[in-house]
Image (cartoon, grey):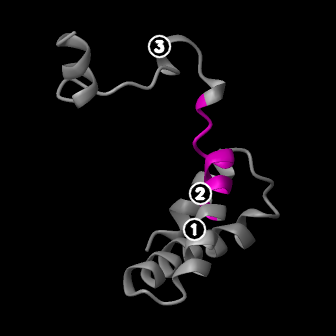
Amino acid sequence: MGLDAFAAGLAARGLPAALVPVLAPIGASVEFFGGLAIVFGLMTRYAALLMIAFEIVATLISHRFWVFQGAERRTVGGRYSLDRWWRSSK
């Protein structure tokens, strides 16, 4: 629904300006129609493979946790997570 905001987010993450108008609609379409295909069981294997490829690309573009340092890089559960409960019970 917010394709302009999605495209702006891609541009802000350093994608070349020439690719953003092409990648934004492709990414949004893959995410939307791939998810619908999985929910409705339509060509599920192909949709799942497409979604896996999408997640890999999305991770490389947007979810770059490896660039953070220190506490920002640490990924742990919050106050009410099972991880925290498990660690405190030992």
Q: Residue at x 62, y 80 (%)?
A: 46
Magenta stretch: includes residue 29: no
* Mark 2 nearby-residue class (10 Å; few <14, some 14–19, many ≥20): some
- Residue 71 bears which disc, if any? 3
View extreme (bottom): residue: 42
**Quadrant that contains the N terminus:** bottom left
- In three-dimensional space, the C-alpha distance between marks 3 and 2, rounded to whole angstroms, equals 24 Å
* Mark 1 nearby-residue class (10 Å; few <14, some 14–19, many ≥20): some
Labels 2 and 1 touching (C-beta < 8 A)? yes
Q: Is residue 34 above or below residue 9?
A: below
> What percent of the width, then of the height, locates residue 15?
75, 51
**Quadrant that contains the C terminus:** top left
Label 2 sits on what residue type?
Glu
For label 2, the residue is 55
Label 1 sits on what residue type?
Met
SS under mark 3: helix
For label 1, the residue is 51
SS under mark 1: helix
